[in-house]
Amino acid sequence: MVRYPSCIMAGCVVPWNSDNQFMEDLFRDQVRKLIREGTQHLYIFGTAGEGYAVNTRQFIEITRAFQDEMHRENCKPMVGVINQSLSTIIERIEMARDLGVTRFQISLPNWGALADKEVAQFFRETCGRFPDCQFLHYNLLRTKRLITADEYARLAGDHENLVATKNSTDSMERIHALLTRVPQLQHFLTETGFVYGSLIGQCGLLISLASANWKSAREFFEAGQQRDAERLIANQMELNAMLHLLIKEGGPGDKIDGAFDKLLWRLHDERFPLRLLPPYEGLSDEAFLRFSEKLRTSFPRWAC
């Protein structure tokens, strides 16, 4: 039995005013709109959600607002916890748990790559410490090591409350290994990986670029559920071209994930600011206008 449903999972991004203060009303509007028009499977504080940047006060303030809005709609919130310190990770899980949160997204500390025994201890101190909670592991190269399918199989055997993974890979070899060797976990894949993954097994869609238009995004997900290769490939070609457009219009220099995700949400709410918590830089208003105009003219099916 798969421990978590196959679904579309989306992250919420956090609006900051010019003084870097949390804009709660805009955030609550975003959560309500995503539930109504997108998906009930929402989380906060991934990399795009600036989980690496918030302080403890902000963590509690935003988690409380998120839990409140999700509870109003009878949805279960998922809260990401990213930190260098394992004790801080445990502390923040406890804080969110006290607010009623029971689903968490965790990633390995990334100051240095963890050894095998250290990985096992990390999961004992998170999944093992909180048996009444469910955990999704966010598997990303920023942590300096990726958990393999065989390692997931051992960890899933040790911890029944490890229920899912997030993998941004487009490697067919890695995707095949995850879906065939660890089928009890629900593996959430970004758009490119989802195309291949859905053709060989059950997986979830970790939505990013496709969130530009939720109607088209749901059609894409349904094509995966039906293993409709022709529709999947057609969608993938469009999304790949959109990604190149987004990066081009974003301007020179590398940008962190949240810069692009905030631009994508602004397509749905033009009040939403593009700024990130310092020292990171968001995209410019001009970049947003260029991308949104070219999206309408070149990819009308994905325009908001």
Image (cartoon, grey):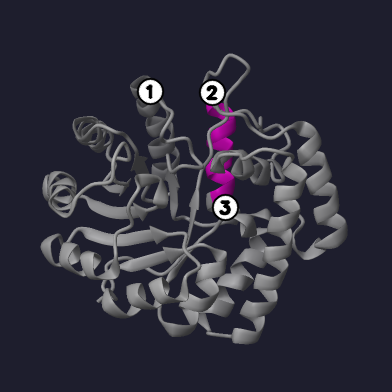
Residue 279, disc: 2
Q: Which mark is residue 36?
A: 3
Please tell me how crowded label 1 is: few (under 14), some (14-19), or many (20+) other residues with Cα within 10 Å. Answer: few
* Position above or below: 67 against 188: above
Q: What residue is at 43 percent from the left and 29 percent from the top?
A: 53
Q: Which residue is under mark 1?
A: 55
Of badges 3 and 2, the one in the foreground is: 2
Determine whether the residue tagged by mark 3 lies in a helix, strand or loop: helix
Q: Is any atom of residue 201 visible in this view?
A: yes
Q: In the rendered structure, which amino acid carries the disc numbered 2?
A: Pro
Does the segment drawn in magenta span residue 28? yes
- Tag 2 and tag 1, C-beta contact below 8 Å: no
Region rendered in magenta: 23-34
Q: Amino acid at mark 3?
A: Arg
* Magenta: main secondary structure: helix
134 relative to 268, above or below: below
